[in-house]
Image: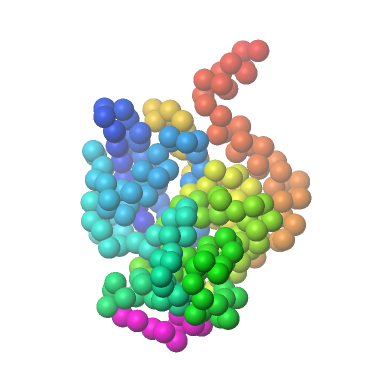
């Protein structure tokens, strides 16, 4: 069960507010993205959900249970693959299961096969390309028994073509697993292509986040980026991401 709720979350660092009365819900099996400028609190939200930080106010609920400040409830994929260089691909993938006292080698090999990595099971990370390392990192996250998967801009360091291929691959693998996903990105195209819903965080914590339900049916078309409705959505979200002060100046000119 992977429903997640953030209720009236506030968080400050050195008396500087980062989040204020944030409310956010991710339904079970839903793919939700968080968009926002640097400093808007995206990674802070992940640290709060993962129990690495405790909010100044508010509660974090998973299926009605309060998990505020608690660890061990999520599977997490960081921006960098963070693979252990002395372990093989298979051994890296099995780490999350080892931590939880269970190791299913057959399942790991099957997941690597679905990821197109079966011939690299005994390779080391040094033998892999950047995109392949990201695939290993994602398979490792899926091997965790946790129903909630947090992805922190996992494709941000990849070139554009590799990034597009990884997005397609992610959706194909997620469609089989249907894990509840919360995804951080700076890329509007990526958020629209991957998500069911998008939360748009403001640069000013006093402003309320905006929410958008993505209208495009699944499975997503390969040429969705060229769709006129997609371009209109991209333009609208781009404007929403602008700081309120900039919008005010533009309206006055």
Q: Which is more toward the observer, 77 or 127?
A: 127
Residue 96 image-quadrant placement = bottom left
Apparent side of residue 186 relative to residue 91 in the rendered image (left or right): right
Residue 176 image-quadrant placement = bottom right
Image x and y of residue 233, in percent:
65, 43
> From where the camera sits, is residue 198 visible?
no
Apparent side of residue 75 relative to residue 56 in the rendered image (left or right): right
Which part of the image, by quadrant, shows the N terminus?
Answer: bottom left
Q: How many marks?
A: 0
Q: Which residues are magenta?
A: 102-110
- Tell me how the rendering is colored: rainbow
Which part of the image, by quadrant, shows the C terminus?
Answer: top right
Apparent side of residue 213 relative to residue 4 in the rendered image (left or right): right
**Does residue 197 show up magenta in the picture?**
no
The kind of secondary structure the magenta stretch mainly shows is: helix
Q: Which is more toward the observer, 32 or 101?
A: 101
Direction bottom: furthest residue: 106
Q: Residue at x 52, y 20 (%)?
A: 245
Image x and y of residue 116, in percent:
60, 76
Q: Residue at x 29, y 37 (%)?
A: 11
Q: Residue at x 50, y 39 (%)?
A: 36
Q: Residue at x 31, y 45 (%)?
A: 7
> From where the camera sits, is residue 226 visible?
yes
Image x and y of residue 183, in percent:
48, 53
Apparent side of residue 69 relative to residue 42 in the rendered image (left or right): left
Q: Which is more toward the observer, 156 or 71?
A: 156
Image x and y of residue 68, in percent:
24, 51
Q: Which is more toward the observer, 32 or 44?
A: 44
């Amino acid at each position: 069960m992977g429903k997640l709720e953030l209720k009236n979350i506030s968080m400050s660092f050195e008396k500087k507010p980062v989040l204020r009365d944030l409310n956010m819900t991710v339904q079970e099996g839903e793919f939700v993205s968080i968009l926002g400028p640097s400093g808007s609190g995206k990674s802070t939200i992940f640290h709060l959900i993962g129990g690495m930080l405790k909010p100044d106010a508010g509660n974090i609920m998973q299926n009605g249970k309060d998990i505020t400040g608690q660890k061990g409830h999520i599977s997490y994929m960081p921006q960098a693959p963070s693979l252990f260089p002395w372990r093989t691909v298979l051994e890296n993938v099995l780490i999350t299961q080892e931590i939880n006292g269970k190791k299913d080698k057959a399942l790991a090999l099957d997941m690597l096969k679905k990821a197109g990595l079966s011939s690299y099971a005994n390779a080391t990370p040094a033998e892999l390309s950047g995109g392949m390392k990201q695939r290993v990192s994602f398979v490792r996250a899926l091997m965790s028994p946790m129903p909630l998967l947090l992805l922190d801009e996992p494709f941000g360091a990849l070139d554009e073509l590799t990034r597009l291929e990884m997005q397609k691959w992610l959706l194909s693998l997620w469609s089989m697993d249907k894990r509840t996903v919360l995804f951080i990105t700076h890329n509007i195209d990526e958020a629209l292509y991957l998500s069911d819903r998008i939360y748009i965080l403001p640069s000013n914590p006093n402003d309320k986040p905006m929410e958008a339900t993505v209208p495009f049916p699944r499975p997503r078309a390969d040429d969705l980026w060229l769709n006129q409705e997609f371009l209109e959505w991209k333009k609208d979200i781009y404007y929403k991401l602008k700081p309120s002060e900039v919008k005010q100046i533009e309206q006055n000119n």
